[in-house]
Image (cartoon, rainbow, N blue to C red):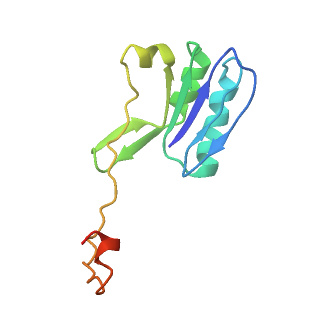
């Protein structure tokens, strides 16, 4: 999932990418930033994007987000908007984006290893 955070007071740009998510902080909000998020989602092959802002989104921003389509979650058996716009006010008031359930991969239990004689203290045995 890609996350784009936008705040009005700070006009600096800082982008971080890690494992299919990206965050950027710029001054002001406009439809071009939503288009940029959608383009980054396509480039990074991310099915979902979350645009977090201090300012209320404009009509064109909402249209651009809606035009990005939907994501079908097999696990939840339902569709989610591919791009959602959330304000900090929404988050502080307890409104959250609609996101699919997160399922972490399962791990197999490792075999128990026999501790060599004389090494019990090192392994807490």
Q: Is residue 85 above or below residue 119?
A: above
Q: How many marks?
A: 0
Which of 119/96 is in front?
Answer: 119
Residue 14 lies in quadrant: top right
Which of 111/78 is in front?
Answer: 111
Q: Residue at 55% of width from left, 28% of height from top?
A: 51
Q: Position of residue 43 (x, y in %)?
A: 64, 50
Q: Residue at 67% of width from left, 15% of height from top?
A: 8
Residue 56 lies in quadrant: top right
Q: Residue at 53% of width from left, 48% of height from top?
A: 46
Which of 91/60 is in front?
Answer: 91
Q: Is residue 72 above or below residue 65?
A: below
Q: Is residue 50 above or below residue 72?
A: above
Residue positioned most to the right: 12
Q: Is residue 117 left or right of residue 38?
A: left
Q: Is residue 78 left or right of residue 12?
A: left
The quarter of the picture where the C terminus appears is: bottom left
Q: Residue at 69% of width from left, 17% of height from top?
A: 28
Which of 109/84 is in front?
Answer: 109
Residue positioned most to the bottom: 117
Residue 105 lies in quadrant: bottom left
Q: Position of residue 7 (x, y in %)?
A: 63, 19
Q: Position of residue 74 (x, y in %)?
A: 31, 50
Q: Is residue 119 above or below residue 45?
A: below
Q: Position of residue 2 (x, y in %)?
A: 54, 40
């Amino acid at each position: 999932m890609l996350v784009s955070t936008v705040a009005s007071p700070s006009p600096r740009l800082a982008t971080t990418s890690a494992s299919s998510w990206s965050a950027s902080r710029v001054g002001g909000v406009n439809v071009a930033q939503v288009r940029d998020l959608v383009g980054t989602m396509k480039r990074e092959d991310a099915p979902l994007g979350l645009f977090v802002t201090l300012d209320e989104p404009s009509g064109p921003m909402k249209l651009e987000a809606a035009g990005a389509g939907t994501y079908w979650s097999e696990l939840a058996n339902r569709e989610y908007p591919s791009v959602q716009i959330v304000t900090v006010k929404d988050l502080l008031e307890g409104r959250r984006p609609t996101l699919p359930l997160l399922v972490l991969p399962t791990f197999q239990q490792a075999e128990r290893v026999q501790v060599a004689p004389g090494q019990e203290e090192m392994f807490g045995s």
